[in-house]
Image (cartoon, coloured by chain):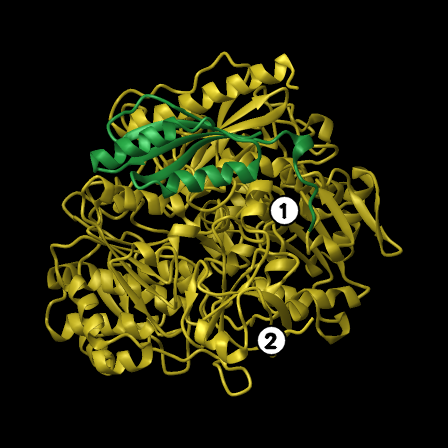
Chain colours: A green, B yellow
Amino acid sequence: MPINGLLINLSDNTSLADEALATMDSHDQLELGEKLDRWIPVVVESQDTRNSHDIHEWIHSLQGVISADVIFASVDQPNSSPKGEL
Amino acid sequence: MMTQELLERRSFLKLSAMAAATSVAQAKTGGPSAGVKDGTGIRWDKAPCRFCGTGCHVKVGVENGKVVAIAGHEGAEVNKGLLCVKGYHVGGILYGKDRLTQPMLRKDGVLQPISWDEAITIVAEKIHKDPQKFGFYGSGQWTIPEGYAALKFIKGGLSNNHLEPNARLCMASAVTGYISTYGVDEPAGCYDDLDAADVVILWGNNPAEMHPVLFSRIIDRRTRGETVKIIDIGTRHTRSSEFADSVLKMKPQSDLAIANCIARYLVETDRYDKDFVSKHCNFRIDKDDETRDLMGKASSFEEYKEKLQPYTFEYVSEISGIPPSELQKLAELFADPKLKITSLWCMGMNQHTRGTAINRLVHGIHLLSGHFGTPGNAPTSLTGQPSACGTAREVGTLCHTLPGGRLVAKADDRADCEKIWNIKAGSVNPKPGYHTVKLWEKFCTPTDEGGDITTMLVQVTNPGHTLPNLKKLFTNKSELKDKFLIVSEVYPTATTEIADLVLPAALWVEKNGIYGNSERRTQQWYKQVEPPGDAREDAWMTIAIARKLFEMGHPGMKDLDGNFIFNIKDEQGAAVPVWDYAHYHDLNVDKALYDEYRQFSYKKHKHLAPYDVLAKHTGLRWPVVEGDDGVFRETPYRFSEFSDPFVEKGKGIQFYHSVTKDDRALIWFCPYEAPPEVPDEKYPFWLCTGRVLEHWHSGTMTMRVPQLRQAMPSAYVEIHPSDAAALGLGNGDLAKVISRRGELVLPVWLNGRSRPEKGEVFVPFFDETKLINQVTLEAHCPVSKEPDYKKCAVSIVKHQV
C-alpha cells in the first residue's frame, strides 16, 4: 500500500490549473495540501504499485498539470518485497 | 482488516509525505522550509542517493531498524527536494528477499556456506601464494574510504598496481580529456551553470533519463518564464530530444568532425575569442599521424588552423548527416560572445574509440570561443556512478594512479605516498598495472598462455554483466580451473554466477560512507540500519584480508615501525583491532581512513573538508578551504578568480596545473577517424547500448524494487519502423541481434521510448536475463582505454520460437 508525496507544478493558464485542481480534489485517493503560487503538494495513497503508477500517469495527463515530481515515497515492508527473480 | 498500529503508521506516513511535499513547495516559492514533521516514530537522517553521479541528497526514514520512507532533501543544493523515480525508491534496494547473508565457497560446483574466518583466510592464502598475480576490481560505487583502503592495500602493501574500477568503462575518457587540456582532472564548472546558461548542448547525452533531476533543473527554468535553449546532438531520438529546441541527428562517431567544424568556423571567420586565447591557451596536436598518446606535442596557431581546413560545413555534413545550415547555426552559437553555453556529456562521448579526442575537442571549442569560466559557460562531463569522481578519480583507484591526482610513474608522487603511509621507500611499483579490458583478458586467458592474473577480488560491481565482449573477458574464466574469482556482493548476479567465493556485503546506509559526485561535491553519511545476516562492510573485508597477510608474514603489510599498515587508533591513541569485526565499530573507521586520505588532497589543490565538517552538510565542492575565520568554504567554479581561492589576484582565469607550466590550457586538434567496426553487408546495423530511466546500470538493485521492475521489466531492441517492416518485424516480435562476438534474442519495440535512425538499433543493458554485452565490442580509446559500447556492427533477423 504505497504512500507518495507529490509536488504538482500547475499551468500558467488559471482556468486549466483550476480545472486540474478540482479534478484531483474529487479523486478519493488524493489528498491536496495548501497551494503555494503554482505548486500544490499532494499525497497519493494507492492500493499497490500498479495503482500508484496509474495515478501518477493520470495526474500527468491532466491538461493543467505541467509536471508531477515525487518528493516522498514509503518503502514497501521487507516481507512484501519481491524475491529476486534474476 | 487493518490493525490500529498499521492505521497509525499509515497516518504518520501520510503526514510525512504531505510535510515533505509542502516543504519543497515552500522552498520553491521562497518561503520557509517546513521540514518533515517529527514525532511519528520515524527517525530521519541524510544520505546521498545510492544511484547515479548527480549526487541528490535524500532523507532516510528509519523505524524499528528498517528504512521505511525516503524523501528528497529540500536543503540539498543539488536536488532541492526533488528525486527521480529511482531516487524515491532507493530505500527498497535494501530489501530484496535474495540478499546475500553469508560467505559461500564453491565446492563441487555448488556455493556452500562457510564462516567469515574461513573466507578471509582463503582470500589471503590465494594472494599470499603470488601477490603479483592478484587483481582487485572495484567501482565508482566504492565509498571514498573503501576505495582508499583498497588502494593502500594493493599499491602500498602488495606493491601491485593491478587495481581498477569499473569507472574505466564509463569516464576514463573524460579524465584523459581534462588532464590533457587543463593538466588536472575534473570539471571547472558545476551544476549552477545549468541555472545560468542560455544554451545547453547535449553531446550524445540523454539527461532526461540518466540525470533526470539535473534535467528538471533546466526545464524548471522554462516554467519560470526563462529562456534556455537545448541543443540535442545524438544518434537517436530520446526523451531529452522531446524537450530540445534543435535535434541534430548525427551518424555514429561523427561528433569529432562536428566539433572540428565549429572550431574551423570560429577561426576562419575570425570570431574566436582572441583575448581569452592569447592570455590563457596554447595549441596541441598528436605527435604524428599514428601516435595517440596523452600529451601529444605543441602546435602553433597556424598549424592548428591548417589542420582544421578540411572541416567545412559541406564536408562535415557528409560525415555526420547533419545539413550544413544546421551545422552553421550550431557554430554561430559559439561565435556569439553574449550567449552563455554549457556543454553536457556522459557515455556518448566517453564510451568511444576516440573518447579522449572528442573530450579534448569539446573543451577546445569552449576555450577557443571564450565560453569558459563564468556562470553558464562550461564544458562539463557527467558521471554515471555515485562516486566515480570521488573514489575512482580523486582517490585514484585506476591502475596508473595514486591518491589526489598522483601517478605511479612519477617518483615524487610515489615518495609522497610512501611517506604518508610510513612504508619503505620503493614500495610503490612504478609500472602501471593492467587497465580493465587487459586485466580481465589476462584473468580469462590460460596461465600457460600468458594469463598472469590468477586471483581476482571484485567489490561493488558486476563485471559479468557490464564488461564488453563477455565471452572473451568474463565467461571464459569458468573453463580455467587455476583461476579464482572472489566476489563481494549484495545480491546474486551474473558475476557471482561463476564466482568461486562469494562475500556478502553491506549496502548504502547499512554502513558509513562518503561519495564524490560529478560537480566535485563530497558527501558523507552515517550508518542507519544493520546489514542483514552476516553481511559486512567492504572496507572491513579489505582490512581483514590485509591483516591475515600481516599474520602470514607478508612484509608489505607492515609499516616502517613494524605496525600493521591499517593501524587505526582511537582518540586516546590506542590501536583498535578493527580487522576483528567485533571491534570494527568501536570507532568510526571511515573517519580514520578519510582523515588519512585527506592529506593527499592538497598537492593538486583538491582540498577536502574535514570529516566532521562534511558531516554537517549535504556535500561540499572541493577545493574546500579554511578561511581566516575558521570556516571551511567550497569552490563552485575552479580556475576563476571570483570563486577559486587558488587563482592569483588579477589573473582572472588561471589554469594553475597547466601541462605547459604557464597557467594555460591546451586547445587540441584531433582528426575525425572512423570507428574500428562499421556496418557491412553481413552485419548491416549499428548497435548502440545504454541505460533506461527506471534501472540503474546492471539492475542488481533496481530490479529488486517492484515499482521499478514492473515499470521496465525486460530489455528490448528498438529499431526504425521501416527497417522492422523490411525484416518482417512488428512490435513485440522476437528479433535476434547477432555480432561477430555473440547473439541475443530480444523483443522488438517500435516507436518506443527512444527512436533510432534507419540502420541503427538500440538495446538497454540493465537486464540480466538478456546480456547485450555478449554482442558488444571491446575496442577502446588508445589513450583512456575506455571501450566503445555505443557502436558495433550487428545483423538483425526475425527469431522464430
Q: Residue at x 38, y 79 (%)?
A: B673
Q: Residue at x 49, y 54 (%)?
A: B692
| The quadrant where residue B191 appears | top left
Tell me the SS state at disc 2: strand
| Residue identifier under label 2 | B798
Looking at the rendered image, the quarter that the C terminus of chain B falls into is bottom right
| The quadrant where residue B23 appears | top left
| Residue identifier under label 1 | B153
Q: Residues within 10 Å of mark 2 (few under 14, many from 20)?
A: some
Q: Amino acid at mark 2?
A: Lys
Who is closer to the viewer here, B318 or B270?
Answer: B318
Looking at the rendered image, the quarter that the N terminus of chain B falls into is top right
The CA span between labels 2 and 1 is 51 Å
| The quadrant where residue B6 appears | top right
Residue B454 point in image, percent of width and height = 74, 62
- What chain is tagged by disc 2? B
Discs 2 and 1 carry the same chain letter: yes
Look at the image and tell me whether residue B662 can be seen.
yes
